[in-house]
Image (tube, grey):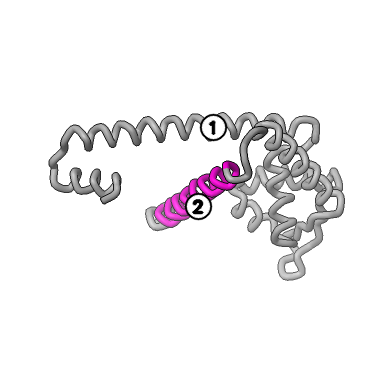
């Protein structure tokens, strides 16, 4: 029986013993430490990686999405990267002004634009990726390839759990609106 199964069984039966409470306390401590460290890495990475590149994290997200998926309408792009449409529009306008994306009228809806990454946008993404790799190489100095593979696998599971949770919340929110 896993720790979670034991906690669920104890909760269902109303029986708790000291080991259940200790396990719950250890889990709470681990969650607190994990959340703290994820936020620390996120803050450090944002400031170091984007510094001096003249690009925001939101702009980078737009460029990466366009690079990965090809031409997109702004409304689809905003939803896919989790930005409000007005914020995505401001970021896209700045990228267009910088020559990182092109925009053409959507032939299916002349009111809308289709956004496409340009060669300059691809180079901007590669510049961020080079800086990310250099930053990670510096902070992970001394870690083995196996250590990094384990960390990557754990983080992938965290991200997947977040995506499932976000998708479930979005579905729940739509159901509550009806």
Q: Quarter-wise, where is residue 52 in the image? A: top right
Nearer to us in this view, 161 or 26:
26
Please give the name of the residue rendered at 86% of the width and 48% of the height, measured from the top-left corner.
99
User: x, y percentage for residue 84?
Assistant: 60, 46
Against 32, residue 89 (above or below) is below
Identify the magenta region. Answer: 147-172
Task: Please give the name of the residue rendered at 75% of the width and 44% of the height, measured from the top-left corner.
Answer: 129
Which of the two residues, 108 or 144, is positioned nearer the viewer here? 144
Residue at image coords 17%, 48%: 12
Does residue 160 belong to the magenta stretch? yes
**Which quadrant of the rendered structure holds the C terminus?**
bottom left
Q: In which quarter of the image is residue 108?
A: bottom right
Majority secondary structure in the magenta region = helix
Q: Where is residue 63 in the image (x, y as percent from the top left)?
A: 74, 50
Tell me if 104 is positioned left or right of 4 in this view: right
Q: Which mark is residue 160?
A: 2
Q: On the image, numbered disc 1 is attached to which residue?
A: 39
x and y percentages locating residue 68 in the rendered image: 71, 58
Q: Is residue 72 magenta?
A: no
How many residues crowd mark 2 within 10 Å: few (<14), some (14–19), many (20+)? few
Q: Is disc 2 placed on a helix, strand or loop?
A: helix
Of pointers 1 and 2, the one earlier in the residue sequence: 1
Please tell me how many numbered marks the rendered image carries.
2
Q: Up-down: is 59 above or below 113?
A: above
Asked whether 19 or 45 is in front, the reply is: 19
């Amino acid at each position: 029986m896993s720790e979670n199964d034991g906690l669920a069984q104890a909760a269902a039966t109303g029986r708790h013993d000291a080991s259940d409470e200790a396990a719950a306390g250890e889990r709470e401590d681990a969650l607190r430490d994990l959340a703290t460290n994820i936020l620390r890495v996120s803050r450090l990475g944002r400031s170091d990686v984007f510094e001096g590149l003249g690009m925001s994290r939101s702009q980078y997200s737009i460029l990466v999405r366009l690079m990965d998926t090809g031409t997109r309408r702004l409304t689809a792009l905003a939803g896919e990267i989790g930005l409000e449409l007005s914020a995505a529009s401001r970021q896209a306008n700045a990228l267009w002004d910088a020559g990182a994306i092109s925009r053409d009228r959507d032939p299916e809806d002349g009111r809308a634009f289709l956004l496409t990454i340009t060669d300059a946008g691809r180079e901007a993404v590669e510049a961020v990726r080079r800086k990310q790799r250099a930053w990670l190489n510096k902070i992970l100095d001394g870690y083995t390839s196996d250590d990094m593979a384990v960390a990557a696998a754990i983080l992938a599971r965290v991200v997947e759990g977040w995506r499932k949770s976000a998708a479930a919340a979005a579905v729940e929110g739509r159901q509550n609106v009806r």
